[in-house]
């Protein structure tokens, strides 16, 4: 990785792209410190500190602390991420969107334009809900129409500005801009989490021996998790494809061998995000309404849905939520892959191009074979996702580690770093490739 960066800085074009990306990231972090006008930031921070809700912690982690500080970037890129997922899911329900998706570059531009509009609409809806909710709770300096409009305008503009910055990074920088913005937000929270671990397990250890053991365990867990995620993200099953030979004019073409790469983690972090959203939404609503702290059945159900109660030796009954979480992650892994990968379409395209999988007949048998292999790979990938997601939950529950980053954050960070390095390497390869014209 270091060798890649060192070689990249030797090329002016790539070096300028890296500096441009870094400059945009500085702008993002500065914007995350700008206070939102009309809001009492200290009251919001105190309210946030007294909640301890997993949904709020995760939301604050992916916004880089902007939500807790209630800056102009409080919504961050969450409306854009939600919009992208919604548009992607709607492509299987709306034929017009599916047609755009197949139209190449022109279709992609139209889809991007629609995603922008939906992003702004979602940002307006979320900011209006936040303004009214905070105003009724007394968190605004003055709850009137002018303050509400100012808050809605600022939050929506901040979210739109981050969307624009992400697209500019994609165009003029390195890597996927939105993914890099999300990654820098998560990384910005990690020093606080590491300091929390140091204070709790190392600085307050009973003796030096316990402090050394705690240090070794923390470093080992983080390294093992990161290495496992690297293998999970890079793992793939290669399906060999043989193309038949054809006679075109006086030449014989075709006959080459290729392969279909099926990633082990086909759905990425989407299954975990979906599962977390469904389970944390009732908890978040109950927290905002001031409910869920009683002793009734409803409160116990909310405790079971909250990750902070899982794997707790003192309250093992609430770990039923972890089992539900595992089932949801596996179900969403199959669901999301089914709408993003169509084995029948792949099989038909191979048949039209004269391709076939050795030992498998073209057409429906090929589709059935791909579906069988894919189902196996999805399950393996979902199990890998669950291992990464459960490790932080286990340590938070058993040892009360209390960190905001979890398996989802680690998968996002590792995945974005790997993809960005691959893009830099591909740009370097194109730069150094001379071709036959220079021979």
Image (cartoon, rainbow, N blue to C red):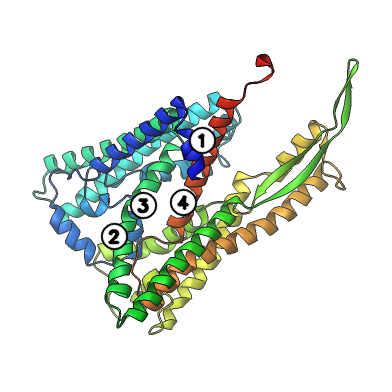
Q: What is the CA distance from the residue labelled 2 to the residue labelled 4?
A: 19 Å
**Quadrant showing the C terminus:** top right
**Mark 1 and mark 2 in contact (Cβ < 8 Å)?**
no
Q: Is residue 197 left or right of residue 236?
A: left
Q: Which residue is mark 3?
A: 187
Measured as percent of width and height from the top left, residue 317 is found at 43, 82
Q: What is the CA distance from the residue labelled 3 to the residue labelled 4?
A: 10 Å
Q: What is the CA distance from the residue labelled 2 to the residue labelled 1?
A: 30 Å
Q: Which residue is mark 4?
A: 412
Of 105 and 7, nearer the camera is: 7
Measured as percent of width and height from the top left, residue 301 is found at 39, 74
**Label ID, residue 90:** none
Of 425 and 40, nearer the camera is: 425
Judged by depth in the image, the label closer to the viewer, 1 or 3, is 1
| Label 1 SS | helix
Residue 127, quarter of the rendered image: top left
The residue drawn where x is 58% and y is 35% is 98
């Amino acid at each position: 990785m270091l060798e890649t960066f060192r070689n990249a800085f030797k090329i002016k074009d790539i070096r300028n792209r890296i500096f441009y990306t870094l400059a945009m990231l500085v702008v993002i972090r500065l914007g995350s410190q700008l206070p939102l006008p009309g809001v009492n930031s200290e009251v919001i921070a105190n309210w946030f500190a007294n909640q301890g809700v997993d949904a709020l912690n995760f939301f604050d982690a992916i916004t880089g602390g902007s939500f807790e500080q209630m800056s102009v970037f409080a919504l961050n890129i969450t409306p854009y991420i939600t919009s992208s997922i919604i548009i992607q899911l709607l492509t299987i329900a709306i034929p017009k969107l599916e047609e755009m998706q197949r139209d190449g570059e022109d279709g992609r531009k139209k889809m991007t334009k629609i995603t922008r509009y939906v992003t702004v609409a979602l940002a307006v809806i979320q900011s209006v809900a936040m303004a009214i909710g905070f105003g009724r709770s007394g968190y605004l300096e003055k709850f009137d129409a002018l303050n509400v409009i100012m808050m809605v305008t600022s939050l929506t503009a901040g979210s739109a500005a981050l969307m624009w910055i992400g697209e500019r990074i994609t165009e003029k920088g390195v890597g996927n801009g939105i993914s890099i913005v999300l990654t820098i937000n998560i990384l910005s929270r990690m020093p606080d989490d590491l300091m929390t671990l140091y204070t709790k397990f190392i600085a307050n250890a009973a003796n030096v021996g316990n402090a050394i053991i705690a240090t070794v365990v923390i470093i080992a867990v983080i390294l093992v998790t990161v290495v496992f995620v690297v293998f999970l993200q890079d793992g793939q099953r290669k399906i060999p494809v043989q193309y038949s030979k054809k006679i075109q004019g006086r030449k014989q073409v075709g006959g080459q061998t290729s392969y279909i790469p099926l990633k082990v983690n086909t759905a990425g972090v989407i299954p975990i995000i979906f599962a977390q959203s469904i389970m944390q939404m009732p908890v978040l609503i109950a927290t905002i309404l001031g409910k869920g702290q009683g002793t009734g059945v409803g409160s116990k159900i909310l405790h079971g849905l909250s990750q902070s109660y899982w794997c707790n030796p003192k309250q093992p009954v609430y770990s039923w939520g972890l089992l539900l979480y595992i089932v949801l992650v596996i179900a969403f892994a199959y669901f999301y892959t089914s709408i993003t990968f169509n084995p029948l379409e792949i099989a038909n395209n191979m048949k039209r191009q004269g391709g076939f999988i050795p030992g498998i007949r073209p057409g429906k048998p090929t589709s059935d074979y791909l579906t069988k292999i894919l189902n196996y790979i999805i399950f393996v990938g979902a199990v890998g996702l669950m291992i990464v997601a459960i490790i932080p939950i286990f340590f938070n529950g058993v040892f009360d580690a209390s960190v905001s980053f979890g398996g989802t954050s680690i998968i996002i960070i590792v995945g974005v770093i790997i993809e960005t390095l691959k893009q830099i390497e591909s740009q370097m390869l194109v730069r150094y490739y001379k071709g036959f014209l220079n021979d």
